[in-house]
Image: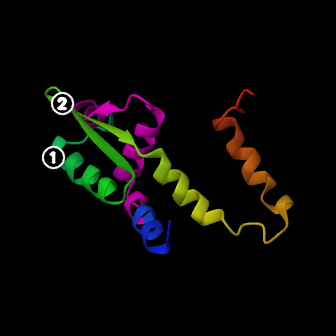
Amino acid sequence: MDEASTILALGALAQPTRLEAFRLLVKHEPGGLPAGELARLLNVPQNTLSSHLAILGRAGLVQSERQSRSVVYRAALAQLRETMLFLVKDCCGGRPELCAPLIADLTPCSPPEVA
């Protein structure tokens, strides 16, 4: 991840409909959502949503897959992870206790791996 990719991702999310669409897709992982269902849930016209999804796609934040007659969209969680890691890479400046609250807040999202 580099600065340009991070700026592209953050810029794509810096619009209310795109942010809401991305959050809905994250919520519906790993199955994703068909475009029509996503438009219905967001209460936006499909052509408007298509433009927003294209911007999120160019930023690498969403992926699409044709399934029969519909297109299913999924959040690109690996890209989200890379973006977040880029932002906090130098978070603690050698003092991990400074980032501990951030890590603690994110931990409930991902249960620990079972050995």
Q: Quadrant of the C terminus?
A: top right
Q: Is residue 79 left or right of residue 88?
A: left
Residue at image position (30%, 35%) is: 38
* Label tally: 2
Residue 30 appears at what percent x and percent y?
44, 31
Residue 47: numbered disc: 1
Crowd tier of the residue under label 1, counting other residues whose Cα lies within 10 Å: few below 14, some 14–19, many 20 or above: few
Q: Is residue 70 left or right of residue 99?
A: left
Which amino acid is tagged 1? Asn
According to the image, label 2 marks what residue?
70
Circles 1 and 2 in contact, beta carbons < 8 Å: no
**Distance from the alpha carbon under mark 1 to that under mark 2:** 14 Å
Residue 31, placed above or below residue 98: above
Residue 73 appears at what percent x and percent y?
31, 38
Magenta stretch holds residue 65: no
Q: Which is the main secondary structure of the residues drawn in magenta?
A: helix
Residue 65: numbered disc: none
- Magenta segment range? 11-40
Say what secondary structure mark 2 lies in. Answer: strand
Magenta stretch holds residue 36: yes
Residue at image position (24%, 46%) is: 49
